[in-house]
Amino acid sequence: MGRWLPVCGALAACAAPRSSPSPPGGLDAEGFRALMEQVAAGARHFEFFGGEKGTKLPMHMTWHHLVFDPDTQVGAGEHAFRLNRQYHGVVMVQLRGGQIERRREYQTESSLSFEEFSAATHF
């Protein structure tokens, strides 16, 4: 158990609150949540999802956890996504001027519901 203390200490230090304000034109946590909900509601309009033509099947995206650092304008969201197949994953985004400038995503295909998928570590 002692070997985990340095790791826990490092994580606690990283979680310390910062005092610097958000960059000009940046979003706060509430604005980030609203932006990501727009992404989930309108993802079918992104080029990856068929652009303006959309897709033959309905797309469903649900956020389970969203976290955001207003100082760096970097956030992440854990999600369930279903189109032709179902996936559970995490997307990292960097914002500039209140818009997503960069993103990367990690996902795993699974037929399990999110509750079943995350049961071992559910929070």
Image (cartoon, helix red, strand yellow):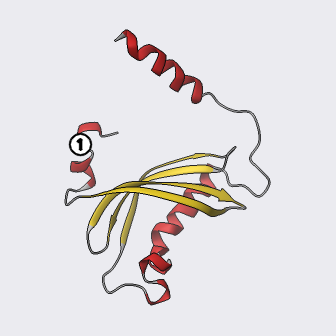
Residue corresponding to mark 1: 119
Vertical side of 54 occupied by 87: above or below: above
**SS class, disc 1:** helix
Residue positioned 62% across, 27% down in the render = 16
The image quadrant that residue 81 belongs to is bottom left
Q: Residue furthest right?
A: 24
| Amino acid type, mark 1 | Ala
Q: Picture quarter containing residue 80?
A: bottom left
For this rendering, which residue is in front, 31 or 85? 85
The percent position of residue 113, horizontal first and vertical second, equals 23, 56
Q: Is residue 8 left or right of residue 86?
A: right
87 up-or-down from 51: above or below:
above
Q: Residue at x 27, y 45 (%)?
A: 118
Question: At which x and y percent is residue 116?
Answer: 21, 49
Quarter containing the N terminus:
top left
Residue 108 lies, in percent from the top left, at 30, 56
Location of residue 57 in the rendering, given as x and y in whole percent from the top left corner: 30, 82
Crowding around mark 1 (Cα neighbors within 10 Å: few <14, some 14 to 19, many 20+) is few
The residue depicted at 77 percent of the width and 42 percent of the height is 21
**In the rendered image, which quarter contains the C terminus?**
top left
Q: Is residue 105 left or right of residue 69?
A: left
- How many marks are shown on the rendered structure? 1
- Relative to 53, is 91 above or below? above
Q: Is residue 69 left or right of residue 104?
A: right
Which residue is at the far top? 2
**Which residue: 44% across, 90% down?**
53
